Image (cartoon, rainbow, N blue to C red):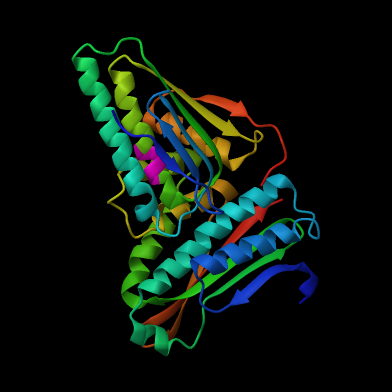
Amino acid sequence: MTEKLYRKPTDYTPHISFDPLKQKFELSGIARPEDTYEFFEPILNWVEDYVKKIIEAHENSRLANETFLIIFNFKYINSSSSKYIFQIITNFKKLLKRRLNVNIYWYYDDPDDQILEDGEDFSEIIDIPFKFISRNKDSL
Amino acid sequence: MNNNHQIISYTGFFSYELTGQLIEKLRNSREKYNLDKSSFRKILTLMVEVLENNYKYVNKLEKKVIDSISVYPMFSLTNEEQYFKMTSGNPILKKDIDPLKNKIDLINSLNREQLKDLYKKTMSEGIYENQEGAGLGIMKMAKITRNKVDYSIKKIKDDLYFYTIEIKIPK
C-alpha cells in the first residue's frame, strides 16, 4: 500500500494531500517553488509509483469500478510548475485508459480568472474532461 | 515623467525572495492604483514570469561576467491611460541573443490559435526538454495580454548586450 503524501503549504508552495485510502488527491494554493524540480519531482515520482501499483492491481482483477478524485484548487501556477502539473494529470489519465473512474475537479475564482484558462488548457491538451467549479469568493 | 503612475520600479539583481517582496508591493498597491481583481491577477502572473526569466538567466552567468556588469537588471510597472506597462531588462550574452530573438519572433508571428497549438506542444514536450525556461513563459505573456511581446537588444560592451522586454496589459 502506498503511503499517504502530505506537504504543508507555504507562501509559494502548494498544499499537497494525496490519500490512497480515500483515493483522493488534492493540490491547492500557490505553485511558485524556488526550485521547481526539487519540489515537484518527489511528488511526480509518488504519482507514477501509485498509478503503476493501481494498474497492476487492476490487471490482477483486484480492482473494479474504483473512482479516483483529483482536486486542483490553485490560486496561481507559474509556468515551470505547469509542466509538472501536466505530468501529474497525464499519469492519472492512465487509470482512465484502464476504464477506472477518474474525476478531476478544477477550482477557479471567476470566469476571467487566469487559473480557469490554465485548467481549460490542461483539459484540452491532455484530452481529459475536468469539472470546473467556481470558488466564487474574493481571494488572492 | 509623472512618478504617480509608477507602481513598481527596481534596479539591481533579482532573486526568488525579491520577487516575493515585489509581489507584496503589488498587493499593497491594489487600492492606491485601483487595480481590479482581473488586472491584479494578470499583472501578478506576468510579473512572476518576467522576473523569473530575468534572474534565472542572470544567475546562470559566470561570476566574472556578473562582476563586469555595468548596466544592472531592472523591472518597472507603470499605470498608463489604456494599459499597464511592464518592463524588464537584463544583460545577455551575444551567443544567447539569436535563440531568444527567434523564440519571441516566432511567438509574435502566431495568431491566437497557432499560439495555443505551440503552447500545447511545448507543454507536452515533457519536463526535461526546453529547460532554458523562457519558452512557456513568453507564450504565457502573449496569451494573457493578447498582444505582441515587444523587446529590444542593445550592446553594452564586447559580447555583453542588454535585453529589454516590454508588455502592455490592457485595462
Instruction: State which region is magenta.
Output: A83-87
Q: Is residue A131 left or right of residue A83?
A: right
Residue B117, given in percent of the width and then of the height, sits at 40, 39
Foreground of the two, A58 or B38: A58
Secondary structure mostly taken by the magenta-highlighted segment of the chain:
helix
Q: Tell me the residue at 24%/22% (across/down).
A: A55
Residue B114 seen? no
Residue A66 seen? yes
Q: Tell me the residue at 62%/39% (across/down).
A: A113
Q: Is residue A139 left or right of residue A59?
A: right
Q: Is residue B69 left or right of residue A63?
A: right
Foreground of the two, A140 or B34: A140
Would you say residue A2 sits in the magenta stretch? no
Would you say residue A84 sits in the magenta stretch? yes
Q: Measured along the vertical axis of the image, is residue B63 above or below residue B90?
A: below
The picture quadrant where one finds residue B43 is bottom right
Residue A102, given in percent of the width and then of the height, sits at 40, 20
Q: Measured along the vertical axis of the image, is residue B108 above or below residue B71?
A: above
Residue B14, given in percent of the width and then of the height, sits at 51, 72
Residue lying farthest to the left in this orientation: A60
Residue A3, given in percent of the width and then of the height, sits at 33, 34
